[in-house]
Amino acid sequence: MEFNVVMPQADVDLDALRKALCEVDPAALVDLDPLHAGLRVAAQLTTGELAGLLAEAGYPVGPTAIQPQPSVCCGGCGG
């Protein structure tokens, strides 16, 4: 799943978040979204699992802060 996450604070430790995400999904990606003051996350997690992981990492967010994004998969690679 891909998510946009609205973060209440600007000082996010991306390395720590990346490490926490990769413990659950080794192929997970996270980066800052400069246009929307938040994160872009791609990981095999549910919205609830991502919220829990963010809270454990010290970045609790409200229920509307995590916005699942529609799939951009075309199926062409067979994945």
Image: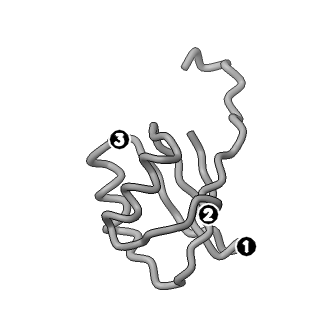
Residue 31 relative to residue 49: left or right: right
Tell me the CA gap for discs 2 and 1.
Answer: 15 Å
Q: Nearer the viewer, residue 70 or 79?
A: 70
Q: Residue 24, how many percent across, how many down? A: 31, 43
The residue at which mark 1 appears reads as 35
Q: Residue at x 41, y 62 (%)?
A: 54
In space, the residues marked 2 and 3 are separated at their CA atoms by 21 Å
Q: As drawn, which residue projects farthest toward the top?
A: 78
In the image: residue 30, left or right of residue 74: left
Q: Quadrant of the C terminus?
A: top right
Dot 2 corresponds to which residue? 65
User: Which residue corresponds to the image point at 59% horizontal and 45% vertical from the top-left?
Assistant: 2
Q: Position of residue 14 (x, y in %)?
A: 41, 70
What residue sits 36% from the left and 52% below the top? 21
Label ID, residue 25: 3
**Occupied quadrant, residue 16:** bottom left
> Which secondary structure, mark 1?
loop
- Mark closer to the observer (2, 1): 2
User: How many C-alpha atoms fall within 10 Å of the one at disc 2: few (<14), some, or many (≥20)?
Assistant: some
Quadrant in the rendering for residue 72: top right
